[in-house]
Amino acid sequence: MNAKQLNWAKMTAVFCIIVCIADFMILFVLGNYYPGYSQLTNTMSSLGASISPVSNIISLWWIAIGIVFVFFGFQFRKAFDNNAKNVKIASGLIMLYGLGEGIGSGVFKADRIGGEMTSSFIVHDIAGSIGLLAALLLPLFMHKVISRKENPFFYGLSWIVFVTGIITMLLFTIRFSSDETSLIIHFKGLWQRLFLLNLYVYFIAISIIMYHKKCRI
């Protein structure tokens, strides 16, 4: 990685950190403009549905986030080893997250008509699910990109993020159950945000490591 590539990597890493922090803030701020919306019981997708008063704003924001993560994945590959198998896979997973959970979720709204899912809702859900699955798998390859010997803290963090990701994703997925009285289902918004918080902490950690990468001579 030459000096020019290093500068791009540093800039992208800073952008990623800003986006991760800003996304949480924007979700809570925009949620206040949706009467009756709850951060604990409502999913983030409902903020972007057509009936939401902040639908267009949040959709554009998700698309912007997706672009940032796609670019971040591209720069990540350059910052580490372009030819290493695990770096390629990790880079692809980051970009897939940006494409699915970011751009896909922003372009296709989670709309329902008469309580039934629209085709846009289905595509939104599929795109988001692919993005979330990519994010869930990311630590399994990142701990090979950055070994335990290189960074023991990050190696341990990768496993913590992976296990926490599985637990929160399972809790969030249970929302499809028919038992509407379940407290687990009731707090679906909480599980989704805990999954996102867990993931963003991980992305920030990756960004910090990427920021401190040095030129190869």
Image (spheres, rainbow, N blue to C red):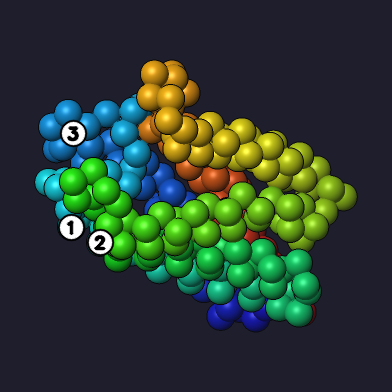
**Drawn side of residue 124 relative to residue 176, left or right:** left
Question: How far apart in space, not on screen, are marks 2 and 1 (Cα)?
Answer: 6 Å
Asked if marks 2 and 1 touch (Cβ < 8 Å), the reply is yes
Marks 1 and 3, the one that precedes in the sequence = 3
Task: Indicate the quadrant containing the N terminus: top left, top right, bottom left or bottom right.
Answer: bottom right
Task: Give the quadrant of the C terminus.
Answer: bottom right
Residue name at image x 51 percent, y 45 percent: 200
Q: Is residue 55 left or right of residue 92?
A: left
Q: Is residue 48 above or below residue 4?
A: above
Other-residue count near label 2 (Cα within 10 Å), few / some / many at <14 / 14–19 / ≥20: some
Q: Which residue is mark 1?
A: 56
As shown in the figure, which amino acid type bears the numbered disc 3?
Asn
Label 3: which secondary element = loop
Q: CA distance from mark 1 to mark 3?
A: 15 Å
Residue at the spot of label 2: 60
In the rendered structure, find residue 216 and report the number of the disc placed on it: none
Residue in the image at 69% along x and 72% along y: 88
Please tell me how crowded label 1 is: few (under 14), some (14-19), or many (20+) other residues with Cα within 10 Å: some
Q: Which residue lies under the disc numbered 3?
A: 32
SS label for mark 2: helix
Image position, residue 195 (x, y; %): 51, 39
Q: Earlier in the sequence, mark 2 or mark 3?
A: 3
Q: Of residues 190 and 188, which is closer to you in this image?
A: 188
Q: Nearer the viewer, residue 209 or 195?
A: 195
Question: Residue drawn 32% across and 56% down?
Answer: 121
Residue 148 visible in the shown view: yes
As rendered, which of 11 and 90 lies closer to the eye? 90
Q: Quadrant of residue 128?
A: bottom left
Q: Is residue 175 left or right of residue 9?
A: left
Residue 199 coordinates in the image, percent (x, y): 54, 45
- For badge 2, the amino acid type reads Leu
